[in-house]
Amino acid sequence: MPDFQFAGPGVLVGSVLEGSPAAKAGILAGDVIVAIDGKDVADLRAYGAVLRAHQPGDTLRIRVKRGEETKE
């Protein structure tokens, strides 16, 4: 679940539901999503646009910033 108050860049993960695909992928609350499938995610609008281009169940590569570290 994104944090809708975050001003970017990227999308701050506010919470992750236990057992969700995000949790299984290792995404944590506090991570900042900066790219999905190689497309930069500057804000919530870009995040939504990238997700709408895919179908439920698609496997996507997510790049996040966790503190000073970037993980994919």
Image (spheres, helix red, strand yellow):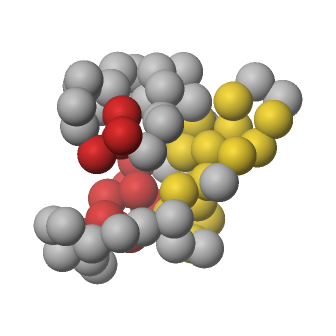
Name which residue lies at 29% across and 31% down.
1
6 vs 57, nearest the viewer: 57
Total count of labels: 0
- Determine whether, in the image, residue 42 is placed left or right of residue 60: right
Name which residue lies at 19% across and 67% down.
57
In terms of image quadrants, where is residue 58? bottom left
- Determine whether, in the image, residue 62 is placed left or right of residue 65: left
Q: Compared to 53, does 4 lie above or below?
A: above
- Determine whether, in the image, residue 55 is placed left or right of residue 40: left
Name which residue lies at 42% across and 67% down.
60
Q: Compared to 45, does 40 lie above or below?
A: below
Residue 54: percent from the left, percent from the top? 26, 76
48 vs 33, nearest the viewer: 33
Q: Compared to 14, does 36 lie above or below?
A: below
53 vs 25, nearest the viewer: 25
Quarter of the figure that contains the C terminus: bottom right
Residue 65: percent from the left, percent from the top? 69, 38
Q: Compared to 27, does 30 lie above or below?
A: above
Residue 27: percent from the left, percent from the top? 48, 35
Query: Does the rendering let one see residue 7?
Result: no
Name which residue lies at 53% across and 57% down.
62
Residue 63: percent from the left, percent from the top? 62, 54
In terms of image quadrants, where is residue 10? top right
Query: Does the rendering let one see residue 32?
Result: yes
70 vs 21, nearest the viewer: 21
